[in-house]
Amino acid sequence: MNSNKVKISFCSRSANEAFARGAVAAFVATMDPTVAELSDIKTAVSEAVTNCIVHAYRDTVGQIDLTAEIREDNKLILTITDKGVGIEDVERAMQPMYTTGSPEERAGLGFAVMKSFMDELKVRSKPGKGTRVTMTKYIRSR
Amino acid sequence: MKADVEFMATGEFLTAALTGEIDHHTAALLRSKIDEQIDRRLPQKLILDFSGVGFMDSSGIGLILGRSKRMQAAGGQVMVRGVSPQINRMLRLANIQAEQ
């Protein structure tokens, strides 16, 4: 498979959660993923984008940059970047069920889902500067 | 993308049949529709049926846990059914048991 890359930018409106996962799903379709793999990827994208909207740009609307890259070894690399509030303690934020959002509405599972549904997850963040989430998924050849 | 919920009440049971895609955007509307029915009908058991749900991220877990707290505060309980294998993976991360 040839390598390929797309980059999309969109504002942190919750209606764009469906747009983001739909766009990535359309791009990834060329890798011929299974239904389960595609669902894993869509879910992870939805979690990462929701984090930007709910946490990074909590009191404002900002830009979210998403890149999706297909490498020749059936490797998909996704990055989701914001210039929002950043995360003070990334390790703590990645603990399952930890949330600074409303406990009535947020389960605190965003990073746990990304970690579980993708093969690799990296989170880099600077308070006041923003956060970059990098996720990798290997699409098994059928 | 849209999500919706239809209700069926029988005796002490209230069934909420969810459809569409559940994310942070759509969960807000589902939450308010379900809470309105809980307040109106005061069921002992709330059944959340995910048979018609094509996609769900962890916002769906928040939806379940929030309704569960609400029902427990009134002495009731929540049952989850009709989940796909993908949704079930998500439920297991939150230690939520779905009915078969």
Image (cartoon, coloured by chain):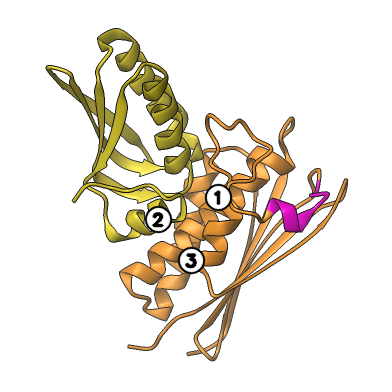
Chain colours: A orange, B yellow
Q: Residue at x 54, y 44 (%)?
A: A16
Q: Secondary structure at mark 1?
A: loop
Characterize the local packing of mark 3: few (<14), some (14-19) or many (20 or more) Cα atoms within 10 angstroms. Answer: many
Callout 3 amino acid: Phe
Toward the viewer: A101 or B12? Answer: B12
Q: CA distance from mark 3 to mark 1?
A: 12 Å
**Is residue A89 highlighted in magenta?**
yes
Q: Residue at x 42, y 19 (%)?
A: B73
Instruction: State which mark lies toward you, 2 or 3.
Output: 2
The x, y position of residue B14, in whole percent, is 21, 23
Toward the viewer: A72 or A104? Answer: A104
The magenta stretch is A86-93
Residues tagged by mark 1 and mark 2 found on one chain of the structure: no
Q: CA distance from mark 1 to mark 2?
A: 11 Å
Q: Is residue B13 left or right of residue B53?
A: left
Residues tagged by mark 2 and mark 3 found on one chain of the structure: no
The x, y position of residue B87, in whole percent, is 35, 54
Residues tagged by mark 3 and mark 1 found on one chain of the structure: yes
Q: Earlier in the sequence, mark 3 or mark 1?
A: 1
Q: Which mark is residue A117?
A: 3
The x, y position of residue A81, in whole percent, is 72, 57
Quarter containing the C terminus of chain A? bottom left
Q: Secondary structure at mark 2?
A: helix
Q: Please report, as a chain letter, where disc 1 is located.
A: A
Q: Please report, as a chain letter, where disc 3 is located.
A: A
Callout 1 amino acid: Leu
Q: Which residue is mark 1?
A: A109
Q: Do tag 1 and tag 2 residues touch (Cβ < 8 Å)?
A: no
Q: Which mark is residue B92?
A: 2
Q: Is residue A140 above or below residue A137?
A: below
Q: Residue at x 37, y 79 (%)?
A: A32
Q: Which mark is residue A19?
A: none
